[in-house]
Amino acid sequence: IFVSSVEEYARGDLHTMIYEQLQAKEQYMKKVIPLYQEMDKDSNGEVTRSEFAKYISDPRLIAFANSLEIDTIDLDQFFDVLSSRGEMPVDLDTFVDGCIRLRGTARSMDVYDLLVRQRSLAQEVGCIRSLLEQHCLSSPQ
């Protein structure tokens, strides 16, 4: 009886925790989407580095960064992580996902940045390998 009571309590606690997380995410989304839409000046569904840069000193972006526990001096790095080092524009899904994943200390952003860089390097190595294989197959031996 005691074990089943504990299990029932744990299931209820899990449901409560999931509900609270969903509620927090919904509140969070209410903050993220309007800011993103305002940065997307041409309304094409993507924010470029130049569009983002115009808001670096905006008090709303600074307050938003503070709510994510991101130091304002790390905002450039934040966008770099989301945009493949500033090479690609950032769509709403990427922005929201990045905000959720990078929320917290700078260490989270640094780890995510390393992950992005590692993926990029893996792609480059794959391309180099393909080129070498093609070269070896096409050159006379």
Image: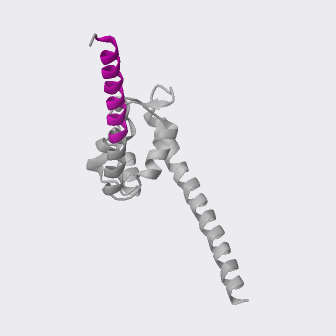
Q: Farthest residue toward the bottom?
A: 2
Q: Magenta residues?
A: 118-139
Q: Is residue 106 above or below residue 126?
A: below
Residue at 46% from the left image edge and 41% from the top image edge:
95
Residue 129 location, quadrant: top left
Q: Is residue 49 magenta?
A: no
Residue at 51% from the left image edge and 42% from the top image edge:
34
Quadrant that contains the C terminus:
top left
Which sits in the foreground, 40 or 8? 8
| Image position of 121 (left or right of 40) | left
Which sits in the foreground, 116 or 68? 116
| Image position of 2 (left or right of 64) | right
Residue 115 x/y as whole percent: 36, 45
* Number of numbered markers: 0
Residue 54 in view here: no
Q: Is residue 21 above or below residue 130?
A: below
Q: Is residue 134 magenta?
A: yes
Which sits in the foreground, 92 or 113? 113
Residue at 40% from the left image edge and 47% from the top image edge:
60
Residue 140 location, quadrant: top left
Residue 47 x/y as whole percent: 43, 32
